[in-house]
Amino acid sequence: MTKRKNGNGTITQRKDGRWEGRCVVGYTDEGKRIRKSVFGKTRSECLDKLKILMDETTIIAGRLPNTAAPDMKFGEWLDIWFNSYCSPGLRQTTMDGYKYLIYNHIIPEIGNIPLNQLTQADLQSFYTRLKNKGRIRNVDALGVGLSDRTVRGCHQRCRAALDKAVEEKLIRKNPAIGCKLPPKKAAEMQVLTHEEIYRLLQQAKYEGYYEMFLLELSTGMRRGEILGLQWKDLDERTGEIKIERQISRINGKLVAVPPKTKQSIRSIILPRALVDLLLKYKETFESKWIFPSPVKENDEPRDPQSVYHRTQLLLERAGCKRIRFHDLRHTFATMSLESGMDVKTLSAMIGHISSATTLDIYSHITNEMQVNAARKIDNSYGRDYEVYDEEIEVKEEETFTFEPFDVYKGKIRKSGTGGIYKINENLYEGRYTPTNAYGKRESCNVYGKTYEECEVKLEEMIAKKRAEIAAEKARLKAMA
């Protein structure tokens, strides 16, 4: 079966060689999909027939009935609302989320009810069914009921569509108003401690991800934003880095799209030491992306999903608690506020719509800051008044000392770090075989009396050879 966009039907090659196209043409009274098939000798012929079938069908994603009427089915109105009023202003990833809820949950369940007969009781019963047994995928892992967030998402889509129906004078009032919903729960925010940050960066350094995670913990960028950075975005002289795109997976492909909001298009000034570190990192490869894919042959950015999995692996190996990559953004924001950064500056750095958004998300941190500030004021002025008899303890500047941490090295050395081999009891050989500027493999060796000595020499030799190869490539490129 060929994977196609939701609402566009499916194409399958049968055992007899023919192609079969299938699509949803309606729904039963119980809300189940009604599907119809077309056949063709070739895939192209089948696609043409499927398009004709879809054009002739009224209740299908993307196909609008000619007129809207009060007694039309709620599913038909949802289809009109989504395609005509809603989707044109949505980002692709947001639109896909809306589409999934509408065509996989709402329409199959209550899409057959006439628009002007839909009641609050119908909607309330629908939300209860979703909560109790509405899940249609990953049932074994997550259970039969949908999450509170998904139930609320279905309600929001229904309410918005019905608001528009009221505006268009198709119905007198919105039956979704007043429905009881699962409580809105804020996602639990987790941040790393200074000790965990130290261990994570040490492990990331060993595995070749140090620059990415250090940049993330120094700027608080979103995952897609940091993967969307290109070298042209970095001003090597001033340290200014522009955030103008982010990497998203859309319809199975990695795509560079504008950042989440208008305020997310921003510039950040990096510390000089971090800029120098990135420029040194740049010498190890040739790519327009700051963090290119290590596995794709074409010059492509890293996959956000692979970065998520790598983050989980690094956290586990570093002995840190399990968090999302997005929680590294929270870690940056929390440390910034605790170190005295004002909310307006932080809001601009992390690309929030307004300072109010930042205050709302990090209210627990700002509350603690206010308490500490009050204590300091008390300690400064309270002694002038007889009412203050108790000594008030004020936190002194914190200094951090970290326990020694041995990185997890595993049984196999990381690609690009060479290999170390024991020659005899008193001699170790370090071997590195890079591809030179002319496309040929060349073997380089170092020797040491101990494994540790050989490891140091090998690391120095690899850095030197990479710099030499980069310089030779640059010379050949200039001559071309």
Image (cartoon, rainbow, N blue to C red):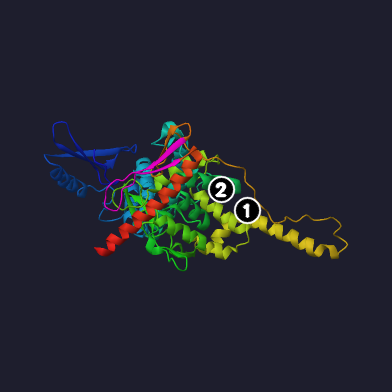
Q: Earlier in the sequence, mark 2 or mark 1?
A: 2
* Left or right for 335, reference 45: right
Mark 1 is on which residue type?
His
| Residue at position x 57%, y 57% in the image | 360
Q: Which x, y percent locates residue 218?
A: 52, 57
Q: Label for residue 364?
A: 1
Most foreground residue, 24 or 175:
24
Mark 2 is on which residue type?
Ile
Mark 2 burial class by Cα count in 10 Å: few <14, some 14-19, many 20+:
many
Going by the picture, which residue comes out furthest to the left?
41
* Left or right for 268, reference 108: right
The quarter of the image holding the N terminus is top left
What residue does disc 2 label?
197
User: Under tag 2, what secondary structure?
Assistant: helix
Q: Which x, y percent locates residue 367?
A: 66, 56
Q: Label for residue 131?
A: none
Q: Which x, y percent locates residue 221?
A: 47, 56
Can the viewer see residue 189?
A: no
**Which segment is the magenta one?**
427-447
Most foreground residue, 44 or 125:
44
Tell me if residue 353 comes above or below residue 322 in the rendering: below
Can the viewer see residue 437?
A: yes
Most foreground residue, 12 or 173:
12
In magenta stretch: residue 443? yes
